[in-house]
Image: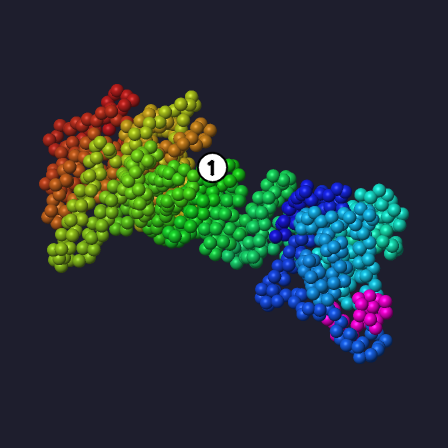
Amino acid sequence: MTVSIVLAVTDEPPEELILSPSTSHIEACQFVVNDHTAQLCLRIVQWLEGLASKALDLESKVRGSHVGTYLPNSGIWHHTQRFLKKGASAANTVHHLDFDAPTREHAHQLPDDKKQDESLLEDVWTLLKAGRLEEACDLCRSAGQPWRSATICPFGGLDLFPSIEALMKNGKNRSLQAIELESGIGHQWRLWKWASYCASERISEQNGGKYEIAVYAAQCSNLKRMLPICADWETACWAMAKSWLEIQVDLELARSQPGRMEQLKSYGDGVDGSPGGIDGTSQPSSEPERWPLQVLNQQPRDLSALLQKLHSGEMVHEAVTRGCKEQQRQLEMNLMLGNIPHLLELIWSWIAPSEDDQSISRPRDPQMIRFGAHIVLVLRYLLAEEMKDTFREKLMTVGDRILHMYSMFLFSKHHEELVGIYASQLARHRCVDLFVHMMELRLNSSVHVKYKIFLSAMEYLPFSQGDDLKGSFEEIIERLLSRSRETKVGKFDESSDVVEQHRLQSLQKALVVQWLCFTPPSTITDVKDVSAKLLLRALIHSNILFREFALISMWRAPAMPIGAHELLSLLAEPLKQLSETPDTFEDYVSENLKEFQDWSEYYSCDATYRNWLKIELANADVSPDELSVEEKQRAIAAAKETLNLSLSLLLRKENPWLISAEENVNESMEPLFLELHATAMLRLPSGESMGPDATVCAALMSALYSSVTEEVVLERQLMVNVAISSRDSYSIEVVLRCLVVEGDGIGSHILNDGGLLGAVMAAGFKGELARFQAGVTLEISRLDAWFSSKDGSLEGPATYIVQGLCRRCCIPEVILRCMQVSVSLMESGNPPESHDQLIELVSSLETGFIYLFSQQQLQGLDMNNAIHKSTPLTLNSYAHFFVPNIYCLRGNIPYAKWSFKRSSHDLASWDEILVLYHCASSSSETQC
């Protein structure tokens, strides 16, 4: 891969291969090891030769043959030999067959031999480009030209390429050392280079074969003779990089010899000891002692100049210039320069969606996105400890955009299992946003698809937040759960039924909990703790949703609250596993599990009631005379089941429904406040939504204030705010705030009715606000209660408020439904045995149910009871049913004692009943 060009570090030469005295090859290798620029050149050459070598292997595999597959002695001039044996003679034809004959006699072999020679040299050139010097030499020898093998690989066939690999390949061969002991280090090296240069120039002057010229030019860095046949980018780049590397080595060898650089400078004033450092107008001598001045002016001064030559050099082939504009070549050139920031910007400019089309599913170049993502990962891994601030910022910001795009591309192609690999490398906020986005998009997908995303996050991300730079599964889930409860913009239709809209949206809210119900892989750390935390979070969020669903599903219709029942089915399997190992998770989930079980029982009652109602409505469409006995019995059985389950819930004494034992202690010296935040829609009696405006918000705020006395407002510092939601123009945001007191925010909650804030909101939910449009109710989509400090910062959840509010709304509704079912049974001639029990249950001060009813609900209860003619209402019953629910509508005043007096008349009417109560804060008896 091209990245290795920039990142590779050359090893030191093995000590066992260091000879004393040293040789030019050892000196060259040590120079490359110590010089960064030379190292870079070396890696570029090796990379390009590796590409060419792989291409040859592929060709051999595909075609079954490759370059150099010639008959033995095919390099011998057989045609010319036969021509001379015949005694023929021609002015332009050589008279001898030795390899020097063409040069000595200024003549050529016959065209057929010359063509065969050119074909041989083309293959030699191809092998040299692939770094296969040894194969090139073998080819020359097998073709009958051993002399040519000696000219391209002197010194007994040693590989003199300045790399550690070549040094190790040569081993402890002392041939070069012996040669240089006599002539001096580098002398024979220069002589061979100069001879190769002279050969390339002479062959060119005689219009020799272009490949023969290039073969010898490659040995001496003669770019002027190599570049004309480099018809592709890789070959031209290889020629330049190899030439530049060898010239750097030649100059280094010159520096290592005393007086050598001064001698070179005396030949040319422009020599400064670097490639390209000679005045281009000078005319270097052809003497070997002046090497490498002959080709110095052809070399680039630095890597940028080398690449610039590829772009616009006079000697460069037109195809090479065009190749420089290709994406692949631009990437490679930026990598060679080590300009990683520009490289990343370049990749992003190619793959970023256009302004007209932001779709990730139709990227401009999927392969480029894939390449960009992987190069970002490689660079981050290899350069983690070496990045400077500016470089790090670019690699992180642009790199994150590339990784994010590739992650979304994989997601769009349904490779969710791979996303975690790349998402885990994103910045914390990007990682969290990505997974939340994917989970939301796949919310309605199959369990298999969702489990792939779950596993991807679990396996590649930490479960808990431990590093501020990395996203965690817990953070993803928290964001996802929070967003799932937000109002979905554009989902509501003003003319449609609000209850049905909320019912349908509740299913989407419930489905989010499924992400917490999957079994984590056993390969992760602390899998048991993770499983426990997932279950705990599932229970907590399910209870939050159960409360909200209960408050929007009290309307008497056959349609089931699908969100609640979806939650119950999702948690069935995790809770089954919990029951099999009860000791494992007891400390985590006991309190939340209790509430979950409470809601499970409530929704079971709710389901039986709706089933009965469905049967009743179906039977109502048929004449009583036409109803079959089976249909009547079915309705009676459903009614009795409804009453039995409801009474079972209401009569729980040791473990009353939805009552928490939690106590709150205010350890701060500063006052603590309670806050209730609700997002809701206004529902008309017709079922349609009521569009809020500033006037409606102001009227509702006034009505909520008026639901309690002015003294309570002042004493508890009650604040009410109502505004149109910024997310949805059909919703409103209601915020209530009050001071905590003993029994409501401090200590235990004796009445378990949500306290002051619960009382105020209950009036809105029940549609009984005295100074607001009659019959208009609040249909919530989100409800939260909090403890808060004096400055308004939220301290923690005040769950008891919402639980108490649910008791205020749900328990009266359950009782009223039971009365409705009782009336139905009475009409069918099957009076229930539990009717009187219901009356006693409501009127009992021990249960406290009377405090949960509003005035209208008590009146409805009495109307149902009046139908039950076999149970006459007593004065005490009337007092309990018809007394105005001052607790609900007049403030949070806990009553210590109730008493009832009748007037002097024997038959008391409502106007003649005196209700006396003692306030807990006053010993005086007050008459209502």
Expressed as whole percent of the image width and height from the top left, the position of residue 625 reads 12, 58
Residue at 33 percent of width and 50 percent of height:
500
The span picked out in magenta is 95-119
Could you say where residue 685 lies in the image, as x and y percent from the top left?
31, 47
Q: 709 or 170, which lies in front?
A: 170
Residue at 52% x, 56% y is 359
Quadrant where the C terminus is found in the figure: top left
523 or 317, which is in the foreground? 523
- For badge 1, the amino acid type reads Gln
Q: Is residue 168 above or below residue 120?
A: above
In depth, the one of 199 and 434 nearer the eye is 199
Residue 878 quadrant = top left
Any part of residue 599 in sight? no
- Left or right: residue 15 versus residue 265 is left
Residue 639 image point, x, y percent: 17, 47
Question: Residue 508 at what x, y percent from top left?
Answer: 37, 49
Q: Residue at x 40, y 44 (%)?
A: 521
Q: Residue furthest right?
A: 266
For label 1, the residue is 465
In the displayed image of the protein, which residue is found farthest to the top?
923
